[in-house]
Image (tube, rainbow, N blue to C red):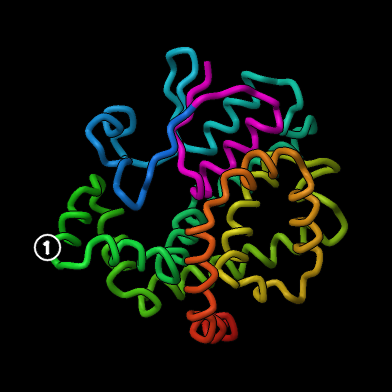
């Protein structure tokens, strides 16, 4: 029995759902409303004290952290493997996952919140007291400080420039990897592709695809992945139109500021 605590638009949950779909695995789950703070409920904090999704429960084992989850799934369900057989290629595939854990995941959250999601939080918590109550529910003090900065400062957050620099480097490295290959590593789709895809699509949803306008291979890579059943089941079917509209509208409004940040790179 596979049970997944997730969120429809969470980039981390998206990658796990795509791996589940690629391997044609049956699962059940709970789609938590992150803006309403369901991840901070006492019941969920007992499952994951960090108060983040996704969390996979399998045969009584609780697996935290999305990159650990997808590698666990690839090991426990070896049919349709998603890590290359060649050790060097396997190491390179894992390297893309490590990059996300080493800071890129945090940076896409900064971009998403500074540009768009802060508006949801401010709408739900229109008073200073309500907003303080939302922040105080975040158990990790580091994450709490980052959230306060993003929601309060938005496009003026100093973290936004650092996030833009980090993703500028990622895009250049992806373009180099895809210059002579259809996939990020080796000759077939891998965990690297499914792990990076949600982060690339998030930038596109925020109207930032101009970031890679001189790298057509990135759009071609995105198109190939969107043609897979894994994408259609793991991401497409879970698309939340309210979030998508918010990201589109907020992204268009923020584009002049973001364009200036990108031009300075």
Question: Which residue is the extreme one toward the top?
Answer: 59
Q: Is residue 61 left or right of residue 207?
A: left
Could you say where residue 54 lies in the image, as x and y percent from the top left?
45, 37
Could you say where residue 110 lies in the image, as x and y percent from the top left?
42, 64
Which residue: 72% across, 33% down? Answer: 82
Could you say where residue 38 lies in the image, as x and y percent from the top left?
31, 42
Q: Secondary structure beneath disc 1? A: helix
Which residue: 79% across, 48% down? Answer: 227
Sort mark 1 into few (<14), some (14-19) or many (20+) by Cα contacts within 10 Å: few
Residue 206 to residue 4: above or below: below
Which residue: 56% across, 83% down? Answer: 259
**Mark 1, residue position:** 129
- Quadrant in which the C terminus is drawn: bottom right
Give the tally of numbered discs. Answer: 1
User: For residue 67, which quarter of the picture?
Assistant: top right
Q: Does the segment drawn in magenta span residue 11?
A: yes
Q: Does the segment drawn in magenta span residue 110?
A: no
Residue 241 to residue 16: above or below: below
Which residue: 46% across, 64% down? Answer: 112
Could you say where residue 131 lies in the image, as x and y percent from the top left?
19, 62
User: For residue 188, which quarter of the picture?
Assistant: top right
Q: Which residues are magenta?
A: 1-28
Q: Is residue 252 left or right of residue 117?
A: right
Q: Nearer the viewer, residue 18 or 101?
A: 18
Q: Is residue 94 left or right of residue 164?
A: right
Q: Nearer the viewer, residue 101 or 128?
A: 128
């Amino acid at each position: 029995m596979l049970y997944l605590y997730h969120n429809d638009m969470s980039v981390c949950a998206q990658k796990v759902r795509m791996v589940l779909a690629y391997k044609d695995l049956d699962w059940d789950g709970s789609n938590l409303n992150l803006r309403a703070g369901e991840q901070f409920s006492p019941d969920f904090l007992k499952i994951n004290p960090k108060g983040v999704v996704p969390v996979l429960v399998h045969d009584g084992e609780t697996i935290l952290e999305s990159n650990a989850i997808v590698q666990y799934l690839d090991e426990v369900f070896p049919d349709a493997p998603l890590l290359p057989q060649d050790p060097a290629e396997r190491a390179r595939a894992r390297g893309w996952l490590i990059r996300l854990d080493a800071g890129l995941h945090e940076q896409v959250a900064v971009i998403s919140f500074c540009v768009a999601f802060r508006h949801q939080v401010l709408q739900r918590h229109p008073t200073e007291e309500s907003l303080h109550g939302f922040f105080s529910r975040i158990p990790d003090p580091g994450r709490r400080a980052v959230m306060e900065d993003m929601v309060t400062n938005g496009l003026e957050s100093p973290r936004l420039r650092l996030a833009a620099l980090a993703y500028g480097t990622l895009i250049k490295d992806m373009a180099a990897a895809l210059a002579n290959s259809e996939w990020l590593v080796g000759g077939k789709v891998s965990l690297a592709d499914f792990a990076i895809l949600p982060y690339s699509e998030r930038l596109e949803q925020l109207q930032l695809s101009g970031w890679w306008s001189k790298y057509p291979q990135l759009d071609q890579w995105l198109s190939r992945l969107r043609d897979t059943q894994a994408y259609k089941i793991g991401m497409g079917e879970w698309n939340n139109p309210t979030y998508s509209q918010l990201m589109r509208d907020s992204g268009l409004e923020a584009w002049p500021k973001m364009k200036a940040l990108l031009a300075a790179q």
